[in-house]
Amino acid sequence: MNVIPTPLGGVLILEPKVFGDHRGFFMEAHHREKYRAAGISCDFVQDNISCSVRGTLRGLHYQIRHGQAKLVQAVTGEVFDVAVDLRPGSPTFGEWTGVHLSGQNHRQLFIPAGFAHGFCVLSQSAHFLYKCAAFYDPEDEGGILWSDPEIGIEWPVSDPVISEKDRRLPLLSQCPPEKLPAGERS
C-alpha cells in the first residue's frame, strides 16, 4: 500500500495494492495490521454506503463530542473528497485538502477525528463507502457551509445538488467553540 501524506497532518491518501487481470480486480479494502503500520490505529465500528447522482454535494459534516475518524472511498464513479481541519489549536485550522477518489483509481482517504468532511459527485453516479471509528449520533452532528468563502474550497461544481439541511449550515466564523469538534480521540 502506498501512503501519501497531505498538507493537513493526519489526513492520508492511501493507494491499496490492486491485483487485476482479464476477470477484473481484487484489493484489500481494509487490513487492520497494514493500516496500523501506516499510522491508522483506530478501530472502525460502523460502515456506511451512499449512492449519489452527478452534482450532489454532501457536507461538510463532523461529530462534535464523539470524534469520528473516517476511511472513505468511491467504490463506483468519481468524487472530489474534502477534509477541513477543525482541530482546536491546530496550525492548519480552517484549511482544507481535496482529492479525487474513484472506482478506477481505488484511492482511499483517511480523515482523523476533528475534521469536517464532504464530497461532490463528478460521474453520472457514485457509490461511496465510509468506514467510521465512532457511531453516528445525530444529536452530536455539526457542520460547516460547503461554500464558506473563508475556507475557500475549490469545488469542481458550481451549482451542486444539496440537501436542505446542508444548505442551512453555518459559516465556520459563526460556529461557537462548543459546536466545533472537541479534538482528536483514539
Image: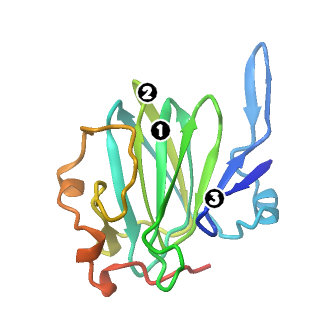
Q: Residue at x 52, y 73 (%)?
A: 92
Camera-side residue of 148 and 176:
148
Q: Where is residue 137 in the image (x, y as percent from the top left)?
A: 37, 70
Q: Which of marks 1 and 2 is nearer the N terminus?
A: 1
| Quadrant housing the C terminus | bottom right
Q: Is residue 84 visible?
A: yes
Camera-side residue of 75 and 145:
145
Is disc 3 placed on a helix, strand or loop?
A: loop
Q: Which residue is drawn at 42% across and 70% down?
A: 94
Is disc 1 placed on a helix, strand or loop?
A: strand
Q: Earlier in the sequence, mark 3 or mark 2?
A: 3
Q: Earlier in the sequence, mark 3 or mark 1?
A: 3
Q: Which residue is drawn at 33% across and 44% down?
A: 57
- Residue 159 position by quadrant: top left
The relative height of residue 151 versus residue 48 in the rendered view (above or below) is below
The relative height of residue 130 versus residue 125 in the rendered view (above or below) is below
Q: Mark 2 points at which residue?
A: 123
Q: Name the residue under label 3.
A: 6
Q: Give neighbour class at mark 1: few <14, some 14-19, many 20+ (Cα, 10 Å).
A: many
Instruction: Give the amino acid at mark 1.
Output: Val
